[in-house]
Amino acid sequence: MLGHDIRNLANSLVAFLQLVRLGQLDASRPEFGELLGLSESNVTELLRMVNALLDVYKLEEGRLEADQSVVRVLDLAKKSMSQLAAEARARGVAMSCETGDISVFVDETLLVRVLTNLLANSVKHTPSGGTATIEAEPARDGWVKVRVRDTGPGIAAADAPNVFDRFYQTAGGRSRGGSGLGLAFCKLAVELHGGTIRVVNAGQSGANIELTLPAETRA
């Protein structure tokens, strides 16, 4: 659970700072640098969790508004992929974009975060040699379908109805240190635009998350 994860990170930081205060760590030794780097990573992760939690609460309480403009899905996808390029390369996962020249009427900052969250899940759960792809196509009048799919193990049918709930974690998410907030944020952010989000292929190989977003013609 999120509270347990936050407590563990905080305890780790406190322990490191206590060792420094008591003079029990020699700054000239290699392990000091390793512990310092680990503490920095823990602070970053702690901030990420807290910010994600605050954003979810703001969306739930209607305290975030969408600053919508016309933007190409390709541009949103490129920004998301650039944020994950290093991790994807390290994990051996290829990212691609098949969006054409389709535009949507969205809050660019929010939608980049949505796509980044979804793509990060794909990169995290897809084995080396696999792929993660962002696609887009026109839907019914005034709407666009955007999909993030991968060649990983997919989302179990039993998990599909709950994956967008706050704090819900699949077994795979728990084993990889997920907070259970990323998909909840995605759902709330998409719904802020009047759109929808769903799991397309529950129980099948390869996750496939589909967003329905307002098209350029609705601007």
Image (cartoon, rainbow, N blue to C red):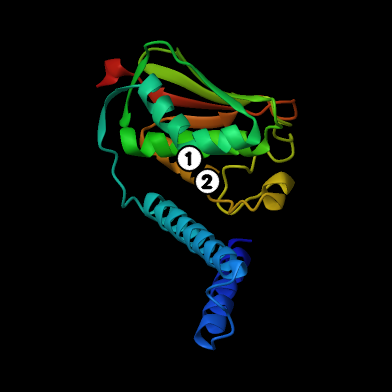
Marks 2 and 1 close (CB-CB < 8 Å): yes
When the figure is inspected, residue 103 is found, relative to residue 60, above or below; the finding is: above
- The residue that label 1 is drawn on is 186
**27 relative position to 188: left or right:** right
Return the x and y of residue 99 as percentages of the image width and height.
Answer: 45, 15
Residue 191 visible, this angle? no
Residue 25, relative to residue 206: is it above or below? Answer: below
Q: Is residue 101 above or below residue 178?
A: above
Identify the image quadrant of residue 210. top right
Question: Counting other residues with Cα less than 10 Å from the Cα at mark 2, is it few (<14), some (14-19), or many (20 or more)?
Answer: many
Mark 2–mark 1 Cα distance, whole angstroms, equals 6 Å
Q: Nearer the viewer, residue 176 or 197?
A: 176
User: Where is the N terminus found, in terms of image quarters?
Assistant: bottom right
Note whether residue 97 is visible: yes
Quarter of the image where the C terminus is located: top left
Residue in the image at 44% along x and 52% along y? 56
Residue at x 42% of width, y 11% of height: 100
Query: Is residue 117 shown left or right of residue 29?
Result: left
Secondary structure under tag 1 reads helix
**Local SS, label 2:** helix
Q: Return the residue nearer the eye: 44 or 190.
A: 44
Q: Where does residue 153 sit, x and y in percent of width and height?
A: 74, 31
Q: Residue furthest front?
A: 28
User: Of the residues shown, which amino acid type is indicated by label 2?
Assistant: Gly
Q: Residue 138, percent across and down? A: 43, 12
Q: Amino acid at mark 1?
A: Cys
Q: Which residue is mark 2?
A: 182
Please state which of residues 87 and 183 is positioned toward the viewer in this rendering: 87
Q: Nearer the viewer, residue 138 or 50?
A: 50
